[in-house]
Image: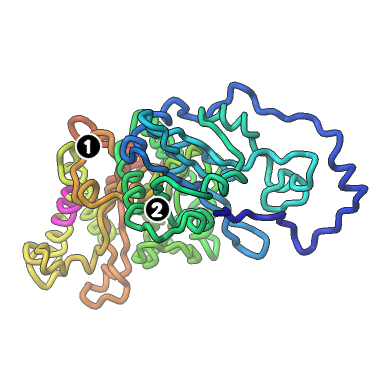
């Protein structure tokens, strides 16, 4: 069995290379070794993670690809981010990881031997380093050689070209993180073994549910940078309010902070003004800012180690909530506070959502919006309150902003909370501008308040507590930043 490989990627407008130039380009290059003491951040954590995965699948080959580049337009690829499972097992986070593959090879009673199949630094005696637009170092930057990559990770390394040899001939029982690298899927005969591969994906998610102290530190760093980004946005509001696409201005301000302090944003920033806030995943961000409306900003910084923050604040663009805006905001805040109060080890994951939704339903009933009582609306065979809130109230957080999503229901959605889990609590109200069940003054209000929390021995710690939550505190915080 042969693993397909990618040939030299030259652009259609590249100039021809003469024999004389090729010969000249192959000479007189100085060595550029990496420092011998460089290691991936969190280096000591990764052997234990691989050992836990190994113990779950004795005697089986496990293949975890980083993923492949994807074309954005013609000869330009999207910026590459390795698959989170690959990152969690190796610590390798860079754009140079495209096409790389981690293999856990069965090694008898010892478990597995991890092997990284990599594309090493381009040799200077060939043409790749200056002619290959996709992988050549003149085009996309340097990579470590095999020995340097082994030092970085503590894992044996092999050339990526040799992966095809490993996958040829008789094969041991094999599981693949399928759907990550189509060439690996093809070479291993996927998706014929979807059940086995699905179990691997589930275990890789479930192993990440509880974060260790180093991971929590990285997540706190992401939260702290996100807090700074939200402060940047408030300071930029006077300029954004004058721009015909103020939402884009806000997006750019936050994204600048994310790119300057980390790898970038954890997800596409939502900067939603007015009724745009009623669109749960509004990422067009092409609207103007109305000083009489609210701004829903849902944004997060991803650290260089690829850990994600995910925070939402809803801000009055005038600096002060109107009475109606405050009424709706306070209901969402009360729902979030009830959800946070339900967080503790041993609680059901869904408990905080149920607590938040009870507050929302009761508030809507008190406003006279619901056509039934709160109790009836909360019944599983009813759910009418969801017209105004619709989505869940939170999710796990980690290397993905919706982390551990491939976990089986009994470990996650129907499971119990454990110390070290990190999650968001984010109830919202989305009162659509065309909803005739609402009084006119409520239509077009979209409010979400989202915070990041880590489960502790006796409850939960609010990681994003540096950002204000109450309406009074939001107004004071904005005033201080704009003074």
Which secondary structure class fits the magenta region best? Answer: helix
Q: CA distance from mark 2 to mark 1?
A: 26 Å
Q: Is residue 335 visible?
A: no
Residue displayed at 68% across by 42% down: 141
Residue occupying the far top of the picture: 37
Q: Which comes sooner in the sequence, label 2 or label 1?
A: 2
Residue stretch rendered in magenta on the structure: 351-358
* Badge 2 density bin: few <14, some 14–19, many ≥20, Cα 10 Å: many
Instruction: Locate residue 335, reporting x and y percent.
Output: 20, 52
Q: Name the residue rendered at 62%, 33% in the picture.
A: 146
Q: Nearer the viewer, mark 2 or mark 1?
A: 1
Q: Which mark is residue 418?
A: 1
Residue 203 versus residue 445: which sits nearer the camera? 203
Does the image show residue 194? yes
The answer to whether 256 appears left or right of 420 in the picture is: right
Residue designated by label 2 = 298
In the image, residue 355 lies in the stretch drawn in magenta:
yes
Q: Residue 470, how many percent across, how many down?
A: 27, 46
């Amino acid at each position: 069995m042969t693993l397909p490989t990618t040939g030299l990627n030259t652009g259609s407008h590249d100039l021809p290379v003469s024999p004389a130039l090729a010969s000249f380009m192959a000479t007189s290059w100085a060595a550029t070794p990496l420092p011998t003491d460089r290691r991936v951040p969190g280096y000591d954590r990764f052997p234990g993670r691989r050992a836990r995965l190994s113990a779950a699948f004795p005697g089986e080959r496990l293949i975890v690809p980083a993923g492949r580049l994807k074309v954005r337009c013609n000869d330009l690829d999207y910026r590459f981010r390795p698959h989170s499972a690959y990152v969690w097992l190796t610590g390798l986070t860079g754009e140079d990881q495209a096409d790389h593959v981690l293999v856990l090879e069965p090694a008898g009673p010892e478990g597995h031997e991890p092997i990284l199949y990599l594309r090493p630094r381009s040799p200077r005696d060939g043409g790749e380093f200056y002619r290959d637009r996709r992988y050549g170092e003149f085009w996309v930057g340097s990579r470590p050689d095999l020995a340097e990559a082994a030092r970085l990770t503590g894992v044996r390394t092999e050339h990526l070209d040799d992966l095809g040899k490993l996958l040829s001939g008789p094969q041991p029982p094999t599981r693949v993180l399928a759907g990550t690298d189509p060439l690996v899927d093809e070479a291993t005969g996927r998706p014929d073994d979807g059940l086995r591969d699905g179990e691997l994906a589930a275990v890789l998610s479930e192993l990440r549910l509880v974060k260790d102290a180093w991971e929590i530190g990285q997540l706190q760093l992401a939260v702290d940078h996100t807090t700074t980004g939200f402060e940047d946005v408030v300071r930029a509001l006077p300029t954004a309010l004058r721009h015909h696409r103020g939402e884009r201005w806000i997006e750019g301000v936050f994204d600048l902070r994310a790119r300057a302090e980390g790898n970038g944003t954890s997800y596409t920033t939502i900067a939603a003004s007015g009724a745009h806030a009623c669109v749960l995943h509004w990422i067009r961000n092409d609207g103007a800012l109305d000083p009489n409306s609210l701004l829903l900003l849902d944004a997060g910084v991803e650290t260089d180690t690829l850990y994600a923050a995910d925070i939402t604040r809803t801000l009055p663009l005038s600096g002060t909530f109107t009475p109606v805006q405050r009424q709706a905001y306070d209901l969402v805040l009360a729902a979030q506070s009830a959800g946070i109060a339900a967080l503790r080890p041993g609680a059901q994951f869904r408990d905080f959502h149920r607590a938040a939704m009870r507050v929302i339903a009761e508030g809507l009933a008190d406003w006279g919006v619901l056509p039934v009582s709160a109790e009836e609306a909360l019944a599983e065979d009813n759910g009418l309150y969801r017209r105004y809130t619709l989505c869940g109230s939170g999710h796990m957080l980690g290397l993905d902003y919706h982390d551990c999503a491939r976990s089986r229901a009994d470990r996650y959605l129907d499971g119990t909370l454990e110390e070290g889990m990190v999650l968001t609590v984010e109830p919202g109200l989305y009162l659509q501008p065309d909803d005739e069940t609402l009084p006119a003054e409520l239509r077009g209000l979209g409010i979400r308040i989202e915070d990041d929390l880590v489960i502790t021995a006796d409850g939960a710690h609010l990681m994003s507590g540096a950002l204000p939550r109450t309406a009074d505190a939001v107004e004071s915080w904005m005033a201080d930043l704009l003074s």
